Amino acid sequence: MSTVTIIGSGFSSLAAASVLAQKGHRVKVLEKNATPGGRARQFQEAGFTFDMGPSWYWMPDVMERFFERFDQHTSNYFDLKRLDPSYRIFFEDGDRVDVPAGEAELYELFESMEEGSGKKLKRFLEQAAIKYQVGVNHLVYQPALSPLEFVNKQVLSGMIHMDLFQSVGSSIRKQFKNDKLIKLLEFPSLFLGATPGNTPALYSLMNYADLKLGTWYPMGGMYRLVDAMYQLALEQGVEFHFNTPVTEISVHRNRATGLQSGEQFFPGDQIIAGADYEFVENQLLSPDLRSYSNPYWKKRTMAPSALIFYLGVKGSISNLKHHNLFFDRSFDQHADEIYTHPKWPEQPLFYACVPSKTDDGIAPSNHENVFILMPLAPGLNDHESIREKYFDLLMTRLEGHTGEKLTDRIVYKRSYCINDFKKDYNSFRGNAYGLANTLRQTAFLKPKLKSKKVQNLYYTGQLTSPGPGVPPAIISGQVAADLLSKHSNP
């Protein structure tokens, strides 16, 4: 029986582990932290249950498709609830818009904000649906080792709808003029780690995921998905080793022989690295075995990092939904401070999640569970005084929108930022989301799933194909596992 040893237990690693075990491999997962999940871990304090990272459950078909590989369903592990409204957006003029789950209500909302935009949205989403079907059902399940993988009947027939040579931003702005509608439609591209102007128009498929497939919530928190995948892996016979950081990939004659963790050695016939790609290359391999140089990594456009606050607040909070986007300052300025002239932002946009609006089991009675996230450029200096400065700024803005004094009601507070991403996940420059999906970093232009130098070493996760986000990570793990199995026997 072939042994596959996997570094990390994030979504991509969990997916790869179950697929490989199902195919007959003996699978061992080495995780540096105490629990599975990677960036999607969870912690409990003062009666609150906080998801540490991902908070949006989109593209439920991707998760369902994964579990169906094992004759299972997500409903066997947790309950999903569709949110309505999907989210609330706060704008600079004090206006706020709730994005409805219903299709008819959505068209009515657009029409009320821009005459004729209801019909335009319908056509836009019809095109986005084609992109979604081609992109998610065909493109992202390819290993992206060669451009030739994408030359097939389904992809070629869908090319006319792909808008291959324009950006999401330009595609949206050609059809809609209302600034608020533009912001609403451009928002999903931020999950891809780049500005709408630098994100290929193919990714308007995210609008289909957002507005048609909907925003969901697994009762108990996003960690329920992690736990479901962990339980599934255990059911397949996967062996987990927690608190086991990998310190070296042992290689003999260009073949990995196993993983070193301190004094302990874990042999492996094949290796999958679900940890940060740059870390694995530069810290776990000798220079002659690295597929990509330091200059290569320095030239990559990284998705943002984030400053996060986990708050427990006494009493209910008015004017907030489960998901809340604050576009009440200049998007262009904040984007410039992330991507073009990296620095701590002057007037940042931010996001607030209050899952206790949906799930009263994650906070004590008469309390709210609040997650606040501010995107920022990776690689910045991070220290407590800066975090506190932005905490005061964000809370002042939040209190202005809610009309309530929230700061005095905080009973629990924890911050998380660049230094924490580096320490907990060996994250390159402290990024939170991986590699940005720009035109020059899409598909076969990403770091490869298979090492160029070590014959039996494979990669998975948000710095390789298909890219950042929970569904792409789950897909990445499956693709890496299938690729490995294609080149080896159990």
Image (cartoon, rainbow, N blue to C red):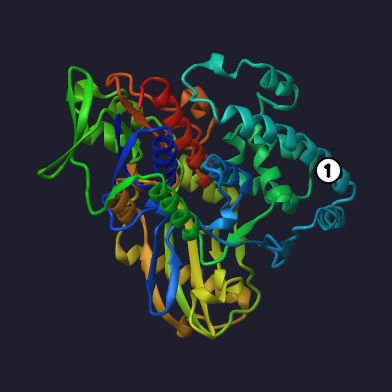
Mark count: 1
Residue 417 against residue 130 in the figure, above or below: below
From this viewpoint, is residue 426 visible? Answer: yes
From this viewpoint, is residue 344 visible? Answer: no
Which residue sits at x=62%, y=15%? 151
Which residue sits at x=39%, y=46%? 431
For residue 478, side relative to residue 154 (left or right): left
Q: Front-most of 94 and 250?
A: 250
Image quarter for residue 69? Answer: top right
Name the quadrant of the C terminus. top left
Image quarter for residue 485? Answer: top left
For residue 246, side relative to residue 90 (left or right): left
| Residue topped by disc 1 | 122
For residue 335, side relative to residue 164 (left or right): left
- Where does residue 184 sit, x and y in percent of width and height? 69, 51
Q: Residues within 10 Å of mark 1 (few under 14, many from 20)?
A: some
- Where does residue 252 sit, x and y in percent of width and height? 16, 21
Which residue sits at x=44%, y=75%? 48
- Where does residue 428 sit, x and y in percent of width and height? 33, 42
Q: Front-most of 224 and 95?
A: 224
Q: Give the residue type at disc 1.
A: Lys
Q: Front-most of 169 and 51?
A: 51
Q: Secondary structure at mark 1?
A: helix
- Where does residue 107 sit, x and y in percent of width and height? 84, 52
Q: Front-most of 456 and 372?
A: 456
For residue 5, side relative to residue 164 (left or right): left
Which residue sits at x=47%, y=55%? 228
